[in-house]
Image (cartoon, rainbow, N blue to C red):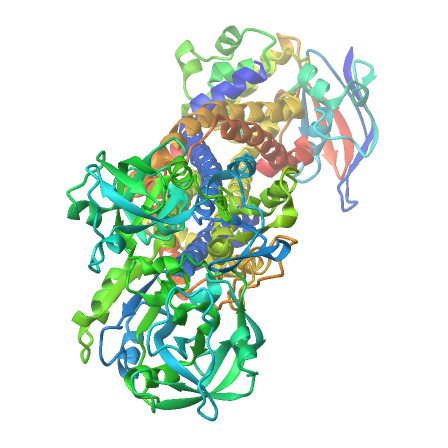
């Protein structure tokens, strides 16, 4: 009888014991596989969480290194402005997910018939009442008023470079004048000069969430205009509306990164762009939110990882314990086999094959069930965990290392029995 | 030989088997304890994240004649769920005089208009922490000399350095702030610092003179309380920003605050600001879910493994059971013997597991987790061409994330662990117990 | 023809207690030998050494003229000798047929029938057989290995008188009819009387008596 036959007969005849060990191995393997999947998922989730902190950097023109001119409104900087071209180059750097820069001006808005649109709470002077504090947007999604939550879109969509003549106004103004998304209104910068009037399509409406009367915002003269009397237009529109003016450019732009941890690297990359004269511009990193939470986020990650590592180590210890227990109970059998002339390696190999027979069924089964386990637990406790996925790579890792561990465990647990001379084993039994 | 003696002899003579059981239970108990302590630690970390996202609400009492009094503030701060961080601010206008009562000169260049009565006046801004005021944090103001104002400051002002220069004032000098309405009503203040602006004031031609950066004066809350409400001793403010621990509680907290008596809440506006939290909320919940699932799986599978192992272990004792029964020892007594053996080993394992788990927790806590003394943050300035514009470190009052075993956790593992060990042993013994002694014996020979 | 020879074989335990001192003996095929002696005199040890379960402290053990250590004890156990124990030592998860097939040089069923087991009994769970039946299986296993030497350690120690006699008869058959060399360790004088040669062990020394 060869050892393969013996191995199979043992596994089959002692099916209850085989079943117990099988269940144990299955449970432990499910545990380890789930652990690996969870470790991966947690890493992704942490990265995603970091990405929600709105980390960005601002490129400002450096007024300190530029010249000064004198004008009607006092002195002003003659430092160069950011151009669309520069911003596109910066935005092309890996890791930047979006950017915005705004040109601000006061626009006078009128409806499709040329009738001036009145502000909320008009003063009575018709030429003042039609004024709206307006921003041009490359990507209105990244405008600070929307990012800070002061304003929220309630209808339509955000502006980006794909819109040529779009405008976003407040719902209050739209309601006041019976306007809706899709309607046409007109805008002009200075109606008393020969500035062009442009036709614009309303692409979205916003609601004012912030307290508009809070004087905290008064550091910014935009606050003189009620938030509801703000408007957002597309870049091409603004450029067309201000085509008579020379000194029009972007004084600053904000670039948003997807992973705050890469911020430093990204800024360095940006500063390597040779076509921009970095003497004239300052980069400021804005990652306060990330800085506040990064420690706590990484703590959570560390804790989960620790748990998974501990579980894996425990699993390995358990396998060794279980197999050693199983082997030691077969001391008599080992003695008989040796007495009958079967060599020690043959006995060990038989036990190794028995364990591998179980593993060959348990590992794939564990892989299949662990795919369900995470989802099962999730729905059981009403938690979604879509990204806890057991991958074939996990399986391969566990299968290979698991097999190595099992074989080692059998070998190690056979040592005490193998060290004895056959005579001693038998006399221990008699 | 009585039951106890058999138990002790078995445990003592079968050292290998006893050790295996002890090792197994020790490892399982340690895993469970560490799992539970990690769970509490992640809860703390999570609460810290929520707190650090700085959700808050603002009470705007500008239109309230009486403002927010110290008494009301105290009641507000008593509300459950507030993190303890808060800011108070007020805004007003005042005439500027030197110590002798002579009007000071304001900057008029670039102003769109200079309203009547404001020829020598400017805007007054008061904040319980001037460094956190939006003029400094967003407007680009910076202290150039002296010290910022805090809630402890009294009768103190910060002047724009160009304003000070123009009027020959320096840090340490005194001046007077006067009410716009009642010209004779003044309050003396000392100049404790100077500031300047690093960003151009965007003149779109609509700024009145009092809003020009040079004409702004920062003062303490008591002084502005005098200017607004006529009381310096009893400090009243216009705005309060109150930070909360969990932004999900903002609705509840704001509702609770509005139940405080003694103030006409109809005249006040309460607004919540938690955009950072809302942005992060879904991701944060996703992370929490993952943690929860991890702990759930580890717990459940551990228990399963425990039951299976105990069953496996007991199978090897059929022979012995038969002998006991053949000797006349009752089934109940035999079962009790096995239970006692497990109980003793489990008790030892549970005792040892405390030490093992504490050691692991300690290592994790001291080596792997971020060291928090007082959790602070500073914005990072990564460029070479700026003068370092460092935001001051803010104390977020976060809790230390500690991985430690709580008494409840330990008691839970003890109770649950023992019950499980005993139950699984009894369960495993059941089939053997059901057999007739004859069958047991014939199975053994 | 001497199939095995022991030359000046001695054995001492780890604590230096000498159990065998300079034992000399030789055994032939076709004969049944009994090793007699009081408990603890080293009978089982002598048998174990002959069977290659352990190595002597001094002296030589030859099989077919060759030192068994040279060929390897494992090979010696596999090819040259076969054991029978007092407590049968069958593998509990193998049927009688499979237990016999363990040493598998010859087909099991005829041998099992030869020792008196029916086809039905050969397929039963080994633990469900009586003591006598189990011992027959053990003998069958020894025969199936086709070893020339059968070493039996108190083979009838756990059996009743009648069954013991049956087993002894079978062992005798193995020696006289199947030309095996059967060596039995026993403390039963009855059994020893049936042997062709008696080795008496006393305090480590051997005494040979021929029947």
Rendered location of residue C132, percent (x, y): 47, 23
Q: How many marks are shown on the rendered structure? A: 0
Quadrant showing the N terminus of chain B: bottom left
Residue at image location 47% in from the left, 67% down from the top: B109
Q: Residue furthest front?
A: A193
Quadrant showing the C terminus of chain B: top left
Which is nearer the eye, B340 or B126? B126
Which is nearer the eye, B18 or B193? B193
Residue at image location 38% in from the left, 84% down from the top: B222
Q: Tell me the quarter of the picture where residue B145 sits.
A: bottom right
Q: Is residue A300 above or below residue C163?
A: below
Which is nearer the eye, A263 or B303? A263
Residue B216 seen:
yes
Q: Tell me the quarter of the picture where residue B297 sits.
A: top left
Q: Residue furthest bottom?
A: B100
Rendered location of residue A167, percent (x, y): 31, 39
Which is nearer the eye, B410 or A212? A212
């Amino acid at each position: 009888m060869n050892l393969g036959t013996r191995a199979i007969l043992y596994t089959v005849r002692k099916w209850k014991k085989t079943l117990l060990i099988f269940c144990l191995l299955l449970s432990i393997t499910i545990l380890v596989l789930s652990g690996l999947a969870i470790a991966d998922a947690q890493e992704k989730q942490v990265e995603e969480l970091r990405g929600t902190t709105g980390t960005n950097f601002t490129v400002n023109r450096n007024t300190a290194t530029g010249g000064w001119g004198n004008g009607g409104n006092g002195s002003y900087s003659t430092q160069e402005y950011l151009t669309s071209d520069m911003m596109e180059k910066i935005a092309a750097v890996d890791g930047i997910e979006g950017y915005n820069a705004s040109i601000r001006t006061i626009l006078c808005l009128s409806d499709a018939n040329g009738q001036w649109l009145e502000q909320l709470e008009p003063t009575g002077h018709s030429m003042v009442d039609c004024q709206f504090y307006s921003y041009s947007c490359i990507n209105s999604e990244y405008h600070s008023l929307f990012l800070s939550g002061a304003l929220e879109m309630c209808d339509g969509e955000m502006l980006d470079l794909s819109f040529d003549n779009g405008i976003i106004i407040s719902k209050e103004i739209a309601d006041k004048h019976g306007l809706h998304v899709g309607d046409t209104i007109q805008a002009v910068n200075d109606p008393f000069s020969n500035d062009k009037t442009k036709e614009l399509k309303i692409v979205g409406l916003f609601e004012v969430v912030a307290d508009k009367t809070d004087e905290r915002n008064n550091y910014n003269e935009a606050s003189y205009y009620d938030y509801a009397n703000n408007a957002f237009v597309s870049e091409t529109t603004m450029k067309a509306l201000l085509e008579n003016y020379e000194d029009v450019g972007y004084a600053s732009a904000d670039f948003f990164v997807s992973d705050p941890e890469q911020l430093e690297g990204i800024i360095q990359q940006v500063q390597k762009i040779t076509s921009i004269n970095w003497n004239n511009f300052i980069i400021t990193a804005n990652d306060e939110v990330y800085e506040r939470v990064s420690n706590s986020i990484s703590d959570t990650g560390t804790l989960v990882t620790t748990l998974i590592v501990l579980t894996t180590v425990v699993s390995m210890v358990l396998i060794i314990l279980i197999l050693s227990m199983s082997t030691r109970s077969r001391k008599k059998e080992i003695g008989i086999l040796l007495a009958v002339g079967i060599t020690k390696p043959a006995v060990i190999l038989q036990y190794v094959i028995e364990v591998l027979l179980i593993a060959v069924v348990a590992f794939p089964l564990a892989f299949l069930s662990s795919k369900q386990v995470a989802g099962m637990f999730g729905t059981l406790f009403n938690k979604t965990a879509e990204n806890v996925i057991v991958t074939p790579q996990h399986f391969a890792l566990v299968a290979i290392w698991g097999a190595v561990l099992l074989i080692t465990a059998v070998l190690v647990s056979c040592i005490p029995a193998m060290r004895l001379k056959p005579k001693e084993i038998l006399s221990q039994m008699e | 030989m009585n039951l106890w003696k058999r138990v002790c002899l078995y445990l003592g003579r079968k050292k290998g088997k006893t050790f295996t059981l002890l090792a197994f239970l020790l490892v399982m108990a340690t895993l469970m304890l560490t799992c539970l302590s990690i769970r509490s630690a992640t809860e703390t970390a999570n609460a810290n994240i929520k707190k650090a996202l700085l959700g808050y609400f603002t009470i705007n009492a500008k239109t309230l004649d009486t403002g927010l009094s110290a008494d009301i503030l105290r009641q507000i701060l008593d509300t459950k769920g507030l993190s303890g961080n808060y800011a108070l601010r007020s805004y007003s206008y005042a005439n500027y005089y030197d110590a002798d009562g002579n009007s000071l000169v304001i900057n008029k260049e670039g102003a769109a208009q200079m309203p009547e009565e404001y020829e020598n006046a400017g805007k007054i801004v008061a904040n319980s922490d001037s460094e956190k005021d939006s003029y400094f944090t967003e407007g680009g103001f910076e202290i150039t000399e002296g010290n910022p104002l805090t809630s402890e400051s009294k009768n103190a002002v910060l002047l724009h350095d160009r304003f000070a220069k123009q009027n020959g004032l320096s840090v340490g000098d005194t001046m007077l702030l006067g009410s716009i309405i009642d010209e004779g009503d003044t309050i003396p203040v000392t100049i404790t610092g100077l500031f300047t602006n690093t960003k151009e004031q965007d003149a779109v031609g609509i700024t009145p003179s009092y809003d020009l950066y040079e004409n702004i004066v920062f003062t303490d809350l008591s002084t502005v309380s005098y200017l607004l409400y006529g009381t310096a001793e009893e400090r009243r403010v216009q705005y309060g920003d109150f930070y909360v621990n969990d932004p999900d509680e903002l609705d509840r907290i704001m509702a609770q605050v509005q139940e405080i008596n003694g103030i006409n809440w109809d005249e006040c506006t309460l607004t919540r600001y938690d955009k950072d939290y809302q942005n992060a909320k879904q991701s944060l919940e996703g992370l929490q879910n993952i943690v929860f699932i991890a702990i759930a799986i580890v717990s459940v599978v551990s228990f399963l493994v425990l039951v299976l192992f105990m069953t496996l272990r007991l199978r090897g004792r059929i022979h012995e059971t038969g002998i006991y029964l053949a000797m006349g020892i009752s089934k109940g007594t035999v079962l009790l013997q096995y239970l006692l053996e497990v109980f003793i080993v489990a008790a030892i394992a549970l005792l040892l597991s405390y030490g093992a788990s504490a050691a692991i927790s300690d290592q994790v806590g001291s080596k792997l987790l971020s060291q928090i003394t007082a959790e602070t943050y500073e914005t990072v300035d990564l460029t070479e061409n700026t003068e370092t514009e460092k935001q001051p470190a803010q104390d977020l009052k976060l809790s230390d994330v500690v991985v430690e075993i709580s008494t409840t956790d330990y008691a839970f593992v003890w109770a649950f662990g023992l019950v499980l060990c005993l139950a699984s042993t009894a369960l495993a013994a059941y089939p053997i117990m059901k057999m007739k002694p004859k069958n047991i014996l014939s199975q053994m020979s | 023809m001497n199939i095995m020879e022991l030359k000046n074989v001695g054995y001492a335990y780890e604590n230096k207690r000498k159990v065998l001192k300079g034992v000399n003996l030789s055994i032939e095929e076709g004969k049944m030998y009994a090793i007699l002696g009081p408990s603890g005199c080293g009978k089982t040890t002598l048998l174990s050494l002959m069977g290659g379960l352990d190595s002597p402290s001094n002296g030589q053990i030859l099989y077919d003229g060759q030192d068994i250590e040279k060929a390897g004890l494992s090979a010696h156990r596999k090819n040259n000798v076969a054991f029978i124990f007092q407590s049968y030592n069958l593998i509990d998860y193998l049927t009688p047929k499979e237990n016999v097939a363990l040493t598998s040089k010859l087909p099991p069923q005829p041998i099992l029938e030869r020792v008196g087991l029916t086809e039905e009994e050969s397929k039963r769970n080994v633990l469900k057989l009586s003591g006598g039946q189990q011992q027959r299986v053990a003998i069958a296993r020894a025969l199936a290995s086709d070893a020339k030497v059968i070493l039996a350690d108190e083979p009838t120690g756990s059996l009743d008188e009648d069954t013991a006699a049956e087993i002894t008869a079978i062992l005798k058959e193995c020696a006289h009819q199947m030309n095996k060399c059967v060596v039995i360790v026993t403390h039963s004088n009855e059994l020893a009387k049936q042997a062709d040669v008696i080795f008496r062990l006393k305090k480590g020394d051997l005494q040979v008596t021929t029947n």
